[in-house]
Image (cartoon, helix red, strand yellow):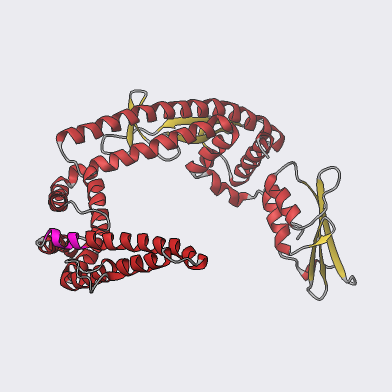
Amino acid sequence: PALGGRAEVSKVRTGMLKAFVEGRFELGGAEGATRIVTDAGAEVDEDGSVIALRAVSVDGRSRAHLGGRSVPVGVLADLSEQLIAVHGQNDQLRLLRPAEQRAVIDRFAGEAVTESLERYRAVRDEWLAVVAELTERSTRSREMAQQADLLRHGLAEIDAVAPEPGEDTELTEQIKRLAAVDELRSAASAAQAAVSGSPDGDPDAPGAVGLIGEASRHLTGSEDAVLRELGPRLDEASVLLSEVGAELGSYLETLDADPALLEKVLARQADLKRLTRKYAADVDGVLAWADDARRRMSTMDTSEEALAELAKRRDELAVTLAEHALTLSEARVEAAAELAEAITAEMAGLAMGQAEIEITVERRTVDESDAHAVKVGGRLVHAGPDGVDDVELLLKAHNGAPPLPVHKAASGGELSRVMLAIEVVLAHATP
């Protein structure tokens, strides 16, 4: 119950109201356990340990406490998972799994294997990506060539028109203006006449500039100081109106400069609409399609040169991968010898003084049909996510006995003791 298991009322002694069980856990620097205790708000004793208490009453109610704090029962279960390993004969199933046996070596070796394995996996990921791309390009060369032709045709059509970003919007505005050129010319001419006067110099239509000039002359000739002070302000207005008149004149010259401009703009708009009907909703979308097409075409090169370059990269990565795999294997072999010796020594205290553990690290040999085959030490081996090694624990039950796989050489009880010895050794290696 102190480990977070089920609390049974039958454990309460007859005539008593409650049953208690208490345990002291040494955290030993285990980060997971420390975090559980901290999150629960429990108090850790000065020696780095914490007390867990479980109580069950005759009415079936159960209470759990950790470090003086009331906590859910699940907190005790989580803590026990971090700190306690309970061994029984059913645990022997773990030793039957090759991956578990390899994990034991890796855990014992620590950084010596962890760092090598990280480098191996990084190169392996890149190697697999190149192998997959080479396979795809080789097997789908005809299909990819057809797709490349379609993309190439589309790019040629877009490049021939050479649209500019936002050009369709600009052309729409320009067409609106050019379509109303007569109305615009009439409005601009009338405005220019009102500002600058009649183009033929008709004195009856002097325009705003002429009227302001006449008003300025009247004021300038006045003997009244107040009227004379208004003269410069009229001069400023005259200058501003003259500028407006000049701009209106330039605008009118632009309208008259190219009568065929509307036709040209409409033709350009038609070219852009052909592209937007086929590739995207607007010109910016067409340009985005072209960029994506160029990117896709860069991965569709099925020429002999491109395939040869990919094959060269694959082989280079395979060599690098083999080097990392060899380093990883050597680290495991060294750790295996040390671990086997430590487990053997630990079993002496578990009534297995005549037994001896051996740990083999062998590379899994395959043939060329294996998609993940790589040559290491002159042999083709399987490059799996955890390396190229198969690890096996062997047990010599007594002196003179041949080393056999541990699950074949040991009884269920002996397997449990082997696992206990392993856990003890690993606990010394890492919390």
Residue at the spot x=19%, y=74% of the render?
183
Front residue of this view, candidates 192 and 70 = 192
Check if residue 169 falls in the magenta segment.
Answer: no
Is residue 269 found left or right of 398 in the rendered image? left
Front residue of this view, candidates 208 and 302 = 208
Position above or below: 101 against 221: above
Q: Residue furthest front?
A: 223
The image shows residue 47 at horizontal and vertical percentages of 84, 42
Residue at the spot x=14%, y=62% of the render?
256
Position above or below: 130 against 244: above
Magenta-highlighted residues: 252-258
Q: Which residue lies furthest to the top in this view?
A: 378
Q: Which residue lies furthest to the bottom in this view?
A: 59
Q: Quadrant of the C terminus?
A: top right
The image shows residue 135 at horizontal and vertical percentages of 23, 42
The quadrant in which residue 128 appears is: top left
Position above or below: 240 against 299: below
Check if residue 255 falls in the magenta segment.
Answer: yes
Can the viewer see residue 135 in this picture? yes
Is residue 3 found left or right of 339 in the rendered image? right
Front residue of this view, candidates 430 and 335 = 430
Is residue 77 found left or right of 9 in the rendered image? left
Is residue 293 found left or right of 261 in the rendered image? right
